[in-house]
Amino acid sequence: MIKFMLTIIHRDLLLLVRQPSEILNPLVFFLLVIALFPLGISPEATLLSKTAAGMIWVAAMLATLLSLELLFKLDHDDGSLEQLLLAPYPSWSLVLAKVFVHWLVSGLPLILISPVIASMLFLPSQAVPVLMLSLLLGTPTLSLLGAIGAALVTGVRGGGILLTLLILPLYVPVLIFGTSSVVAAAQGLAVSGHMALLGAMLVLALMVAPWAAGSALKL
Amino acid sequence: MYFDLPTTSRFLNVSDLACERDLRILYNDLNFAVKAGELWHIKGINGAGKTTLLRQVAGLHAVDTGQVLYSDNMVKMIYIGHKLGLKEQLTADENLTWLVGLDGFSTQQQRYTALEKVGLKGYEETMVAQLSAGQKRRVALARLHVCKVDLWVLDEPFTSIDQQGIVDEQNWLHQHISAGGTVIMTSHQAITLPHVKTLDLSLYGPQSQSKNKANGQALR
């Protein structure tokens, strides 16, 4: 089964190397949103440092959502999803492999670039490690939960908006605790409670989402 | 593996299978038993449910009424449908690598030999996007030659293949069943091989409803 998952991961990474625009899309979107916010509101440092956490988290969420629609759609359209489902392995393993690649492309780059973004938005420096940690715990949860929606709308024409409606409510808790952890850190408060909750959400999503998405794909 | 079993043994048993799509009954009361070493040719007009039947046999489409039962759940199967399952941005060899790699292992030597066998020598490192429709289907069919698999489920495997290619393909089918393999396929082309079992889906279609109702076996 490990080999089955590695085969999928290898294939998807190869496809991404051939089509780098898919890697860059979420990242560019993220950067654009962040860059436009100060222009739209105010470039004032005090205001930006207060809103930075929320901006970064909302932008990260939207960037993830943007790239989710294609998670299973391309495989469904060219028939390779059938081949993946026919392999004698549980469908959750295929979901897990695909979600891992999705996170590598949409989550990891955001985490890596977040310190730069944070300094751009005058986020207090003591909050930066917390921001990175909250994104590290939060973005895989976003990818996992999103996979459920992506699997449900696979094969549905114009499923994009449906996917957003299905998934956004599930994203809200992650957004709330992700943002509030960074805000707490900026004010010098303890963040272990927030982190514990983000971690708990990740564990729950890891247990439930691959199985749910796998079952949805078989429909 | 069923290769160890006597060739007369039942391999796949389909009983009382029915299929309904959009409130329309495609077929019902379908009963047939496939033995190892047989080639089954599923016939029927467009929309008769040939593809759906193959998908039910392969386990890709839910079976609501009736049963599809394999004698051994370790049966290895290759399903090649209308959608070939090839990635356009990967080369022929890379596509074979991942398709075979899902449940097995292949060396480059094996893959190149398979591609040569389907007439794609020299195209191993060509992006599938640049191949013609017939060549794409040949890439998908090359998978049949990479490693030995018991059951081939092929949906219209002759589509967009040239005349010589169809002759070659029938030879492969013959070799496969001679070696104890099994094939279930649909095609509008005649299959010019001896001992082909034919299943005509139109015999199980809506026209036969009145008969079934009389037997008290109506689907709905």
Image (tube, rainbow, N blue to C red):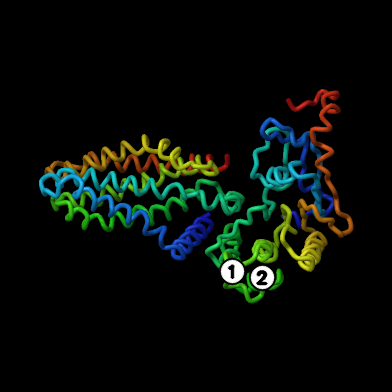
For badge 2, the amino acid type reads Leu
| Residue to which mark 1 is pinned | B93
- Classify mark 1: helix, strand or loop: helix
Lateral position of residue B14 relative to residue A118, left or right: right
Asked if residue B159 is positioned above or below residue A47 in the image, the reply reads below
Lateral position of residue B131 relative to residue A209, left or right: right
For badge 1, the amino acid type reads Asp
Q: Is residue A160 visible?
A: yes
Q: Position of residue A145 (x, y in %)?
A: 41, 42
* Snapshot quadrant of residue B114: bottom right
Task: Evaluate whether label 1 is on the same chain as label 2.
Answer: yes
| Residue to which mark 2 is pinned | B115
Residue at image point 63% right, 70% down: B111
Q: Is residue A208 visible?
A: no
Q: Position of residue B94 (x, y in %)?
A: 56, 66
- Classify mark 2: helix, strand or loop: helix
* Circles 1 and 2 in contact, beta carbons < 8 Å: yes
Q: Residues within 10 Å of mark 1 (few under 14, many from 20)?
A: many
Residue at image point 51% right, 57% down: A8
Lateral position of residue A22 relative to residue B113, left or right: left
Callout 1: residue from which chain? B
Q: Position of residue A94 (x, y in %)?
A: 51, 50
Query: Where is the N terminus of chain B found, in terms of image quarters?
Result: bottom right
Q: Earlier in the sequence, mark 1 or mark 2?
A: 1
Callout 2: residue from which chain? B
* Snapshot quadrant of residue B141: bottom right
Query: Where is the C terminus of chain B found, in terms of image quarters?
Result: top right
- Tally the marks: 2
Q: CA distance from mark 1 to mark 2?
A: 8 Å
